């Protein structure tokens, strides 16, 4: 199978299905972040409900149907795979009537190609045992941003927060299509009866949620920067948002200060040693008194 690069002026899926005459995709097929897609879906749902009541809407709006339904009316040989429509591969038919969840090829495509869009950092800096990836942006509330392509980013929790709070047992995140705001609560992680809220480092619309982390929040602790990412965002004003974050040398300076503050906190508040051999362990809270959770949040998770 030959993969292809997407043209910057690719036609919208609704246009390719001939539901609309002319519409160019400007969001790299991140449909969940597209107002045009949401508006058409809303109109299609309204048409379906009216049809069930035996009412026919007049005009062009009344003729709107979902792009997948439009393509299902085509002969099998003319139904293009969604990956072809997005410009990823040469022409291939869709044998599953656009039920991608049942398609072996769709699973294969994501396994073989999508995983490689998550390029591992060139290197990690070690700050007293805290891993700090090169090329990521940091928010002072211990969330990170990794730029994927165009205005799409991945979001997660840094290694410092993971080590301080220990293994998470539950997570709650915004659903796909929901908007999050820089500096506002967006990620809620729990460790048994204890809960911690983390701020979104940028503004954007959720385009994907890591289902593996939803099922096993402990992935965040095992691999916070790669497999433990939490959700993806489409960020329309990404350049402006990134100006408020830390990067490269600022990351290292910030983390050094956080580690030093943590050592001072432990000595003053608990009289317990912060580290074994100069490095922080993986579950600091698990080795502290039960009432330490709120104080850790107050001092370190803004």
Image (cartoon, rainbow, N blue to C red):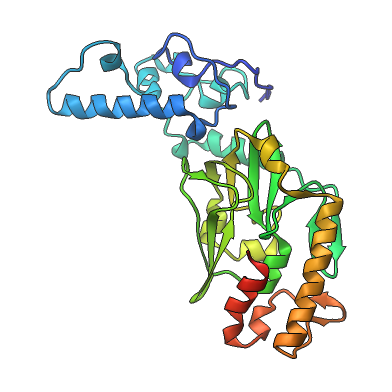
Residue found at x 80% / y 71% = 259
Locate residue 291 relative to residue 253 in the image: left or right: left
Q: Nearer the viewer, residue 63 or 216?
A: 63
Question: For residue 46, what is the image quadrant?
Answer: top left
Residue found at x 25% / y 24% = 47
Residue found at x 69% / y 54% = 139
- Tell me, yes or no, if residue 95 can be seen here: no
In the displayed structure, 85 sits above or below 295; it is above
Locate residue 260 relative to residue 295 in the image: left or right: right
Q: Nearer the viewer, residue 198 or 23?
A: 198
Image location of residue 302, percent across then percent down: 63, 64
In the displayed structure, 27 sits above or below 73; it is below
Image location of residue 133, percent across then percent down: 80, 53
Q: Residue furthest top?
A: 21
In the displayed structure, 222 sits above or below 236; it is below
On the rendered image, what quadrant is the N terminus found in?
A: top right
Question: For residue 73, what is the image quadrant?
Answer: top left
Residue found at x 80% / y 46% = 135
Counting the numbered discs, the total is: 0
Q: Residue furthest left?
A: 54
Image location of residue 111, percent across then percent down: 63, 41
């Amino acid at each position: 199978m030959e993969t292809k690069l997407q043209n910057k002026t690719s036609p919208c899926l609704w246009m390719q299905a001939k539901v609309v005459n002319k519409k160019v995709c400007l969001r790299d097929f991140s449909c969940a972040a597209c107002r045009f897609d949401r508006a058409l879906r809303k109109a299609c749902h309204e048409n379906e409900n009216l049809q069930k009541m035996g009412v026919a809407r007049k005009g062009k709006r009344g003729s709107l149907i979902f792009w997948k339904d439009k393509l299902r009316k085509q002969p099998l040989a003319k139904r293009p795979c969604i990956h072809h429509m997005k410009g990823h591969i040469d022409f291939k038919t869709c044998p599953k009537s656009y039920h991608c969840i049942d398609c072996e090829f769709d699973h294969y495509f994501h396994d073989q190609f999508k995983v490689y869009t998550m390029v591992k950092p060139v290197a990690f800096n070690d700050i007293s045992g805290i891993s700090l990836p090169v090329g990521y942006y940091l928010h002072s509330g211990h969330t990170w941003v990794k730029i994927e392509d165009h205005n799409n980013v991945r979001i997660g929790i840094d290694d410092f927060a993971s080590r301080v709070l220990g293994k998470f047992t539950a997570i709650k995140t915004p659903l796909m299509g929901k908007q999050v705001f820089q500096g506002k609560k967006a990620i809620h992680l729990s460790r048994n009866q204890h809960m911690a809220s983390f701020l979104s480092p940028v503004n954007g619309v959720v385009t994907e949620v890591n289902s593996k982390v939803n099922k096993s929040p402990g992935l965040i602790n095992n691999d916070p920067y790669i497999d433990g990412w939490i959700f993806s965002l489409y960020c329309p004003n990404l350049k402006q948002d990134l100006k408020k974050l830390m990067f490269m040398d600022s990351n290292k300076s910030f983390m050094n200060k956080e580690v030093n503050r943590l050592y001072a906190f432990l000595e003053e508040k608990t009289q317990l040693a912060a580290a074994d051999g100069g490095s922080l362990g993986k579950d600091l809270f698990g080795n502290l008194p039960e009432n330490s959770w709120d104080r850790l949040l107050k001092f370190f998770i803004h």
